[in-house]
Image (cartoon, grey):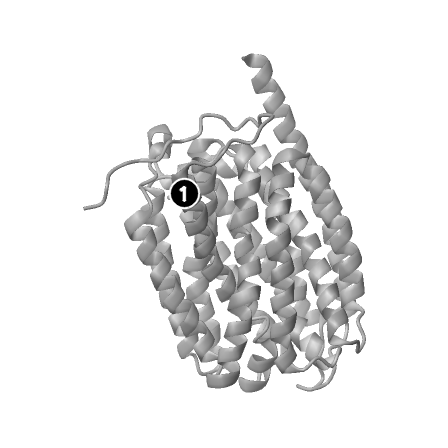
Amino acid sequence: MEEQQTIEIPKTNIQENQPAPFSSYQKFVIVLLALLQFTIILDFMILSPLGDILIKTLNMSTLQFGSVVSAYAISAGISGILAAGFADKFDRKKLLLFFYVGFIVGTAFCGLATSYETLLLARVVTGIFGGVIGAIAMAIITDVFSLNQRGRVMGFVQMAFAGSQILGIPIGLLLANLWGWHSTFFMVVVLAVLIGLAVVWKLKPITEHLKLQTDKNALEHLWHTVRKRDYRIGFLATALLSMGGFMLMPFTTAFLVNNVNIGQTDLPTIFFFTGLSSMFIMPIIGKLSDKIDKFKLFSIGTLIASVMVLVYTNLTPVPLWLVVVINMVLFMGIMSRMVPSVALNSAIPAMYDRGAYMSINSSLQQMAGGLAAIFAGFVVVQPTKTSPLENFDVLGYIMIGFFAWCLYLVYRVSEMIKNRAAAAKNSV
């Protein structure tokens, strides 16, 4: 029988001078959520390195491939909006398990797909369930960890992104080359089943937020969350954060293969070293995010990412080692934006709104990214399946514009959190 014990909820969101240490249970939660995020991110990220294979194998156009990528994101966004009103009405553990099981089923359907149409449908199903999991995980992090711990937590949890590149993507590409691209999705299914069992057996119920609910029904709770002005600023900042990446990511392997003349067999090397560098930098960024101003760190990451996006999207045939170095520095800049911005955004909602806020936040992020992928499919043109991509550099210039807009919004979030902390301090 499941142990009916709830975790202790941090009593303050105000950042103190010294970062608080983690308890043994908190360390377990970090590892579990990192592994869970690994499967979610790998399931989504694997489409990019498989892009050139899928386009040629399933005879897809760049617009159709962009639609496959965006199908997950848009369905995830719609699902998150619909789930937002219910997100704070249930034990977060049970909610996590429900959507994770659905994600596993959807990923299995992806492995069974045989055409563009069936793969598109499978990605919709996967997105309906998988897109909500990140929001639930963020709500759990916000419940279990105080603000002065979250930078380090996000640093470790976001290492799942690096882990997917170091282990997941290279292994997935190897399986795709040996037994076909279907086997890559089955690999994700096996990993997800094992992690799901760990959630069932080891994660404690998380129900403290249920004591604070005041809205009578789910729709009322959803409306009360959306109508708050501070929340809307956070929603828009997070949505813009993802748009640039969604524009670039779907076509990176096709660009490297057809424009930079990188061999299909060399792609795992690029992803491995990019992930390795991210794995190294993520804990450092997480620690810095808990010690220095988060917006300042975000600004530095934005500057690095902007420069490297311009370099990357204008690449011509160059040696493999140079592509690896450019990719490593680019993702260091991207990660330096992601960790502090997510940590700041997690401090916006009150406890009784966290599940709904994170669901809506994640949904808008996914939908914005999905629209960005479709937009990129219109911008990027490939006359034949083996010819170079055209207009890829245009995506880089557009990304810089989104980076600048996002920088302004994250600044507003940062100032909002500082003013709220100062007001709380003065009221004591």
Residue found 41% across the figure and 51% down from its top:
32
Q: Out of 427 and 22, give the one closest to the viewer.
A: 22
Q: Position of residue 187 (x, y in %)?
A: 42, 72
The reply to whether residue 79 is in sight is no
Q: Out of 247 and 319, give the one closest to the viewer.
A: 319
Name the quadrant containing residue 188.
bottom left
Q: Out of 284 and 195, give the one closest to the viewer.
A: 284
Q: Is residue 291 left or right of residue 46?
A: right
Q: Callout 1: few (<14), some (14-19), or many (20+) C-alpha neighbours within 10 Å?
A: many
Depicted 313 relative to depicted 428: above or below: below
- The type of residue carrying mark 1 is Gly
Q: Position of residue 347 (x, y in %)?
A: 55, 34
Name the quadrant containing residue 125.
bottom left
For label 1, the SS is loop
Q: Is residue 397 left or right of residue 262?
A: right
Q: Out of 290 and 380, give the one closest to the viewer.
A: 290
Depicted 312 relative to depicted 217: above or below: below
Q: Position of residue 350 (x, y in %)?
A: 48, 31
Q: Position of residue 227 (x, y in %)?
A: 53, 36
Q: Quadrant of the C terminus?
A: top right
Residue found 74% across the figure and 65% down from its top:
325
Q: Is residue 212 left or right of residue 48?
A: left
The reply to whether residue 189 is in sight is yes
Residue found 63% across the figure and 42% down from its top:
340
Residue found 46% across the figure and 41% down from its top:
141
What is the tally of numbered marks visible in this picture? 1
Q: Kindly identify which residue carries mark 1.
A: 85
